[in-house]
């Protein structure tokens, strides 16, 4: 993949520093999942909210503004899938209502994508 354009890098950095409440809520759970996730990753001409490079999974959080951009989102998803990425979309309301469930669904998608047959170990703080 070609180098990321400097303007895309600065846009991604601005999105990371100005994260929405739902992005912060989900990031608190995804940052402990292995393989690692990253926030606001530029891919082509798009920036995805969360991405696992190892499993090539992109996670998008959609708010009410996406109700008017269904065609654009479909085009974006098709482009990312043409690069070999699997795109998972969740509504902000789902993240607010059940952040652990959304994180679990993402972790399961990573495991399935990587062909894992055993559940991942618990994060180091759980079970103590």
Image (spheres, rainbow, N blue to C red):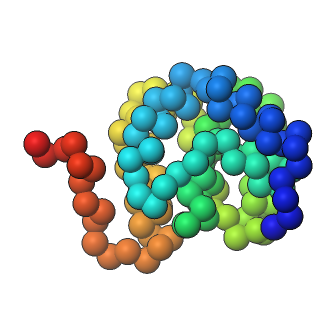
**Residue 72 showing in the rendered view:** no
Q: Residue at x 40, y 40 (%)?
A: 29
Q: Is residue 24 above or below residue 36?
A: above
Q: Quadrant of residue 43?
A: bottom right
Say which of 64 and 84 sits in front: 84
Residue 21, position as x, y percentages in the image: 54, 22
Q: How many marks?
A: 0
27 sits to left or right of 14: left
Q: Residue at x 38, y 74 (%)?
A: 116
23 sits to left or right of 83: left
Q: Is residue 94 above or below residue 70?
A: above
90 sits to left or right of 95: right
Say which of 1 and 74 sits in front: 1
Q: Quadrant of residue 84?
A: bottom right
Q: Residue at x 79, y 42 (%)?
A: 9
Q: Residue at x 69, y 48 (%)?
A: 41
Q: Where, quadrant-wise, is the C terminus in this rendering?
A: top left
Residue 100, position as x, y percentages in the image: 36, 39
**Residue 15 showing in the rendered view:** yes
Q: Is residue 94 above or below residue 45?
A: above
Residue 10, position as x, y percentages in the image: 80, 35
Say which of 88 and 8 sits in front: 8
Point out the residue furthest to the left here: 128
Q: Quadrant of residue 90?
A: top right
Residue 24, position as x, y percentages in the image: 51, 29
Q: Is residue 14 above or below residue 46?
A: above
Q: Where, quadrant-wise, is the N terminus in this rendering?
A: bottom right
């Amino acid at each position: 993949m070609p180098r990321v354009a400097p303007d895309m890098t600065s846009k991604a950095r601005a999105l990371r520093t100005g994260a929405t409440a739902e992005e912060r809520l989900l990031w608190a759970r995804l940052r402990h999942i292995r393989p690692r996730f990253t926030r606001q990753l530029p891919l082509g001409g798009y920036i995805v909210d969360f991405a696992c490079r190892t499993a090539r999974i992109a996670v998008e959080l959609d708010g009410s503004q996406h109700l008017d951009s269904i065609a654009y989102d479909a085009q974006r998803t098709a482009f990312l899938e043409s690069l070999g990425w699997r795109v998972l979309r969740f509504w902000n309301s789902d993240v607010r209502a059940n952040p652990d469930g959304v994180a679990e669904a993402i972790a399961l998608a990573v495991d399935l994508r990587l062909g894992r047959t055993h559940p991942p170990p618990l994060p180091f703080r759980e079970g103590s």
